[in-house]
Image (cartoon, grey):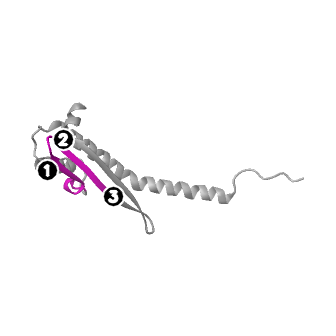
């Protein structure tokens, strides 16, 4: 009687390597977008804490653009990704989408959405 084979075949190993390569490629493609979003959130919260309560939305947006330049976010403009309003409180609604090419005609689409308000930011201090 013949003993059955044990272990992985060459095809199974090749398949595992291909899946690992695809996962690494996806991680490399999406990591910068998530890192930039984390920096954007931190900067919005920081400026909301540091700003006076009667700051105008236009001045807030200009200061955010300056912070983006200081932090190396040169391809993103604050006015393109967020809307600043003042209704009893300064409210910042961030909503944008990032598309990264993945393979051939496949793109990865990441949507980032969050709302900030000045009163909550100042209470979190």
Q: Do the residues under discs 2 and 3 have CB atoms within 8 angstroms? A: no
- Disc 1 versus disc 3: distance between alpha carbons? 22 Å
- Residue 26 against residue 52 in the figure, above or below: below
For label 1, the residue is 62
In the rendered image, the quadrant that contains the C terminus is top left
Give whichever of 94, 67 is nearer the camera: 94
Looking at the image, tell me whether mark 2 or mark 1 is earlier in sequence order.
2
For the point 13% across and 48% down, the residue is 57
Secondary element at tag 1: helix
Secondary element at tag 2: helix
Image coords of residue 10 (percent x, y): 67, 58
Image coords of residue 83 (percent x, y): 20, 52
Image coords of residue 43 (percent x, y): 23, 43
For label 3, the residue is 98
Please report the bounds of the magenta region as a residue range.
76-96
- Disc 2 versus disc 3: distance between alpha carbons? 24 Å
Residue 44: image quadrant is top left
Q: Counting other residues with Cα less than 10 Å from the Cα at mark 2, is it few (<14), some (14-19), or many (20 or more)?
A: some
Q: Counting other residues with Cα less than 10 Å from the Cα at mark 3, is it few (<14), some (14-19), or many (20 or more)?
A: few
For the point 21% across and 47% down, the residue is 92
- Most extreme residue toward the front is 88
For the point 21% across and 55% down, the residue is 77
**Could you say which disc has been placed on residue 107 in the image?**
none
**Could you say which disc has been placed on residue 47 in the image?**
2
Magenta span contains residue 89 = yes
Question: In the displayed structure, does residue 111 sit left or right of residue 117?
Answer: right
């Amino acid at each position: 009687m013949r003993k059955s084979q044990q272990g992985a075949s060459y095809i199974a190993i090749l398949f595992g390597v291909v899946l690992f390569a695809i996962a690494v490629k996806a991680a490399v493609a999406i990591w910068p977008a998530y890192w930039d979003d984390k920096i954007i959130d931190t900067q919005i919260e920081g400026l909301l804490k540091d700003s006076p309560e009667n700051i105008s939305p236009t001045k807030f947006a200009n200061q955010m653009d300056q912070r983006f330049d200081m932090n190396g976010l040169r391809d993103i403009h604050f006015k393109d990704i967020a809307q600043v309003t003042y209704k009893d409180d300064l409210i910042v609604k961030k909503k944008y989408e990032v598309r990264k090419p993945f393979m051939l005609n496949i793109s990865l689409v990441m949507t980032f959405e969050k709302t900030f308000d000045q009163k909550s930011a100042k209470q979190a201090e």
